[in-house]
Each structure stands twice: as C-alpha cells, then as structure tokens.
Amino acid sequence: MTVFEVPQGRLKSPFYERMKAVDTVNSWHQWKGYTTPDELYCGETEYFAIRNTTGVFDLTPMTKYRITGPDAFEYLDRLMTRDMSKVGPGRVAYAVWCDDQGQVIDDGTIFHLREGDYRLCSQERHMAWLTAAAIGFDVSIVDETHDVCALAVQGPTTYSILRNMGIEGLEELKIFGLMHVDFEGTELMISRTGFTGDLGYELWLAPEKAEALWDALFEAGKDYAMRAIGVHALEQARIEAGLLAAYEDFLPANATVRTGHTRSPLELGLEWLVDFKKPNFNGRRALAEEKRKGSRWRLVKLDIEGNKIANASYIFANAQMRGGNIGFVTSATWSPVCKQNIAIGTVRTPHGEVGSNVWVEIYYQRELHWYREVAKATVVSKPFWSPPRRSATPPEPY
C-alpha cells in the first residue's frame, strides 16, 4: 500500500495563469491549498455561459486518489455502499462511503479507468480513512491530486466545441462513460460527467500540457462565447441540478464533534446508492437498522414562492410556525433558467413527503434594513434542471 503525503502551502493550478489573464474582479479563495476563483467576470454572466453556451471550470484542486492492486475491486466494494461490480472499465459512478455508524464521510465519483485501475475523486481529503479501511487488502492508494489537472467543460455547446478540437469517437460516449485520446503526445482522458446537471464533459491530463489544452479548447470554442467560470456560477448550477455538496448539505462524519449533526445516505435521499444485497460494506449494519426503524431526517428539494432567496432559513410545518421549526435550508438560489426560487434542505421525519407544503422563514436585507417573509414551499421529487441533452447520445451539435 502506497501513501503520498499532500504538501502543505499555497498552490497554483497549471491553469492559473490562463484564468488570471481573463480575470476582471480579483475574487479568489483557497480550495484545499489551491487559489481558486469565485468569479472571473461576473457570476451571472458565467452562470449563463453554463446554460446557454459553455462554461469552463478548473477542477485541478479536486482530490484524486489512484487505487490499484490485486484487491482494488474488493477494497472499493467493501468501502462503498453501492455494488461496484456494476461499474465496469470505462465507466464512472457516483458513490458515498460511510463510517461504522452508517454516517456519510463523503460523496464522490469513481472512475474505472481500466480493468482493476480506479480513480476516486472527492472534494475533501481522505487519505487517513482510506488507508485505515485498506487494512487486510492488497491495494495501492496514491494521492495524485497534483499529478493530474482537470477542466470541467459544461453546457449545451460542449460537444460541438470538443469535436472542433478534432476529438473523434465523442459521439459514442454515453453519460458516465470515459474515453482516452491522444493530445500532443499525452493521454487525455475525457469523461462525460459534471456538476451542473447539463450536457458536459471533464478533461483530465498531465499538468505540463495544461496550458496547451486550455488554448486548444478556447480556440475551438472561439465562436461560441464560451467562458472560464468560478465557483459562484457552478454552485448555482449544482443547486438547480439537485446535487449535494459537502459542508453545504451535509458534514463529513469524521469532521464533526457533536452527535446528531451528521447524515446517513438514507437521510440524504441516496438510498438508491445503498445495496443491501451486498453482504458487507462499511456501515451496513447501522444502515439496515435505520431502514428497519426509519430515518430521523429527510432531504427535501423545495420550490419556494416569491423571489427572496432562502439562505440558511428555518423550515416550518405551518404558516403560523406553531410547534417550532422542523428543519432548515442548506443550499438556496434563484434559478434564472427555471424562473423559480429553489432550495435544498433537511427536515425531521415524518415531514417533507413529496407533494407536501412547508413554510420557510426568510430574512433579507435591502439598503441596511432587514425584512422578514414567511413563504410557502412545495416539496418536489425531481431536479429543477435536467434537460434531455444531458444524456442524449450523440448530443445535438451546434
């Protein structure tokens, strides 16, 4: 088993100079040691690039673990709640992993690169947990975060732009599939994945070819008004897609100090990722007991009346707010493309069934004055944004 210690300090992505060259607002933050843009021009303009053309987001800071060895499959199948035998070579899977109490440590994507060769990507760093969970397995776990740079290329014109780059075979790539092509003598991996709920791809390659990839991509998309984007635009798009984010919609179980502040996959609406047909996986016994007794919490997607964004709002069972709050909003935004005031939240069961109504207490400020509004909200089942082009094979060209 191989362990690579992540160096500490301020890091710059191989794409940093290209992003800095187009930056007009100087709004950056740190993402796991990397300097990452909040926005580069205007968050709203960048959001509309995702939904109308193509937005390009630097994924390099995302944690990447390469998992190989004779027991790589057995290890991942024990670690993850889903059945990893269904994730063949050339496929990508969304997954969660839990502690022994069935509480989510994190979610992420598993890339089955080739037979027995995997890459696990997540927002947070998890080497200590991954190595502890590997005891008894013949596996190699290598932190390759700094050895692989990546771009998320998201939006309706992405297929056409990548075709303009001369990439062949893209028309056969299905959603959650991956392929390998040559780019200037280096292997470029393309996965049909993303965090926007739209048509999109992610490009993965060695850092020394990062700027060449950026230049080729933007040259191919010069007639499509594509833009580099920051976190603010991506965050708005992922809420529309109903996708969860660590430290926003749940806390990693190994990062909390107070009981009751974590969530299980069942409480996050991810029961479809828990395969009880598997005899063993981390947290199975606790999750089976929860399924038998019922969960404490329920994830809800809310369509809220009005246009006041429900950031960090309490949720109530009635408009009079009798009985106290039943939960709270974790992520919220106004959706320009859906023309809806939307949110993701968590409520105590039995509240929050699909089709039911709840009420959200919203506070907002206008010219230093604070206002309060109690808005009706409907619990919905589907993502707010999931166009047919997301999974169309081949996608429609532009």
Image: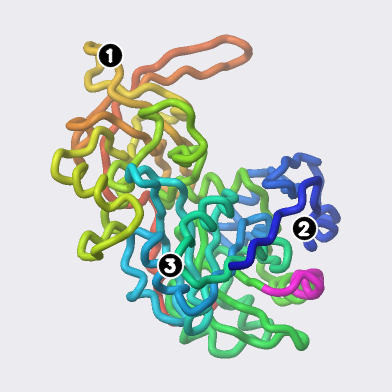
Q: Amino acid at mark 2?
A: Ser
User: Is residue 301 visible in the rendered structure shown here?
Assistant: yes
Q: Which of the two residues, 220 or 329, is positioned nearer the viewer here? A: 329
**Which residue is under mark 1?**
324
Give the image quarter of residue 5.
bottom right
2 or 3: tag closer to the N-terminus = 2
Give the image quarter of residue 64.
bottom right
Q: Which mark is residue 75?
A: 3
Q: Which of the two residues, 193 or 79, is positioned nearer the viewer here? A: 79
Q: Is residue 112 above or below residue 129?
A: below
Q: Secondary structure at mark 2?
A: loop
Seen at 63% across and 60% down, the residue is 55
Q: Amino acid at mark 3?
A: Tyr
**Which residue is under mark 2?**
13
Seen at 47% across and 29% down, the residue is 309
Q: Is residue 345 above or below residue 15?
A: above
Crowd rating for badge 1 (residues with CA inside 10 Å; few <14, some 14–19, many 20+): few
Residue 78 falls within the magenta-colored stretch: no
Indicate the position of residue 18 as horizontal and vertical percent values. Answer: 82, 60
Q: Amino acid at mark 1?
A: Gly
Crowd rating for badge 2 (residues with CA inside 10 Å; few <14, some 14–19, many 20+): many
1 or 3: tag closer to the N-terminus = 3
Magenta-highlighted residues: 205-214
Crowd rating for badge 3 (residues with CA inside 10 Å; few <14, some 14–19, many 20+): many
Q: Residue furthest front?
A: 136
Indicate the position of residue 301 as horizontal and vertical percent values. Answer: 33, 41
Seen at 44% across and 26% down, the residue is 258
